[in-house]
Amino acid sequence: MRWFIDSVRVRLTVTVSLIFAGALCAAAYGLVQQVEGALVSDVQTRNDDVAKALARVLSSSVVDPALLNDPSQLSVSLGDAVQEDAVRDTLTQSFVYVQGPGSASVASANGLFDRLRRFFSGEAVPLFGKVLPSRIDSEQYVVSQVNVQSPQGPMTLSVASSLEPIRRTVDRVANSLVFAVPSMVGAVALLAWFMTGRALRPVSAITGRVQEITGSTLDQRVPEPETEDEIADLARTMNAMLDRLESAADAQRRFMSDASHELRSPVTSIRAQLETALLRPESTNWTEVGQTVLAEDERLGALVDNLLALSRLEEGVRRPTSEVDLDEIVHDQLIRSFRVSINRSEVLAGRVIGVRDELTSVVRNLIDNAARHASTQIKVSLNTRGRTVRFTAEDDGPGIPIDQREKVFERFTRLQEGRSRDAGGSGLGLALTRRIVETHGGRVFIETSELGGASFVVELPAIDEDDL
């Protein structure tokens, strides 16, 4: 029952039906009122015309008003003036009453004298279309009244017509509408139910398919209607979302696979070194073994640190920021010994707002990357241009093709042998570098170095006095 109440199809059908029923009832009521008003107006017009016609005859001729007691004789006596259909019908179907001076009764057609006399006021001015304020014999009447200056003296001529035929006609119309309105509302409800069901059918198909999709079946897609409506947009949006989820899941699987491989490599190397040494402990150079194990341990530690840092950044965890002198970080990193020569002549001042440890990781990763792939030398520069601090690490190595420059910032990316990460890189340094730079509002990209290799460029917002 709860599902039935919460159903969009049911709510739409009920809403449309109620609105249509309300509008149709209002229209039906207006129609009944209009029909009744039109019929009453016709009777009023007919009474007025008859009263005026009789008044003209009585005022211009010496006609005995007593002839009204016999309408058939009156029609013959009055001649062509009252032979029109409207006048003839009124004389036979309605009531005509004439009052003389002092409200004396002169004549009454169709025997309504006793019942109508008290409602005819004998006013001095004509009164047309007056609906009596009460009922006579359970009926209402429309009365037209006119004063006549006849040869016999002043008289008041009144014509009264019953509204009972109109009431019966209106009742028939109302009774017809009583059956027609529910039928039309039911038809509209069925139409609304059918149309909403047809419109929502793709939603049911989408819902059913989504319920079937699991983490292992992200390759499935929801059906897209051929229409160009909002539901089709919803289906396309959901398929685009599923594309992103599938890509993210694939990337996560690749990441886990690559991370497992990277973690296994130094562990396997350490184990192999120790097992080999233990086979001939008396002839083993334990100093060399220790240096090898220590190097692999450092590589393993760097990989774990990068994984933790990248995970923290992906989760959006932000650490407190402060004013950082990048030139100090660069000089500190260049104190270390490298196998290649370093040109540091263009390292100038540069200050930014950020997390010092993270910015240190950026500088270290890029300098180590340049030193790892350089043939004989690297060049490190830092300067401030306007509101931008620019840090560059260049090498004279094999360089990076333009079509692969974005790819190197992906996790565990393998390029050609010339710049492989087998020389000691963890495969996460550049990915971590880009993520840190982006969280600091900057960007990192690759250019071709004047030395012939790759030039990694970092641009960060320079410190502003308002930031202090």
Image (cartoon, rainbow, N blue to C red):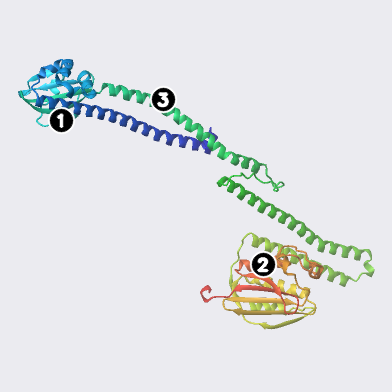
Q: Nearer the viewer, mark 3 or mark 2?
A: 3
Mark 3 lies on residue: 179
Disc 3: CA contacts within 10 A as few (<14), some (14-19) or many (>=20): few
Tell me the amino acid under the disc marked 3: Phe
Between the residue at mark 3 and the residue at mark 2, the CA separation in whole angstroms equals 75 Å
Q: Nearer the viewer, mark 1 or mark 3?
A: 1
Between the residue at mark 1 and the residue at mark 3, the CA separation in whole angstroms equals 40 Å
Q: In the depicted view, which residue is nearer to us: 117 or 101?
A: 101
Tell me the amino acid under the disc marked 2: Arg
Helix, strand or loop at disc 3? helix
Rendered location of residue 105, percent (x, y): 9, 19
Helix, strand or loop at disc 1? strand
Q: In the depicted view, which residue is nearer to us: 195 or 73?
A: 73
Identify the residue at image location x=22%, y=29%: 45
Identify the residue at image location x=26%, y=21%: 164
Mark 2 lies on residue: 434
In terms of sequence position, does the residue under pointer 3 or pointer 2 come before the other?
3
Helix, strand or loop at disc 2? helix
Q: In the depicted view, which residue is nearer to us: 354 or 165?
A: 165
Mark 1 lies on residue: 127
Left or right, 405 with reference to 60 = right
Rendered location of residue 458, percent (x, y): 65, 73
Left or right, 408 with reference to 6 = right
Left or right, 339 with reference to 135 = right
Identify the residue at image location x=12%, y=17%: 67
Between the residue at mark 2 and the residue at mark 1, the CA separation in whole angstroms equals 98 Å
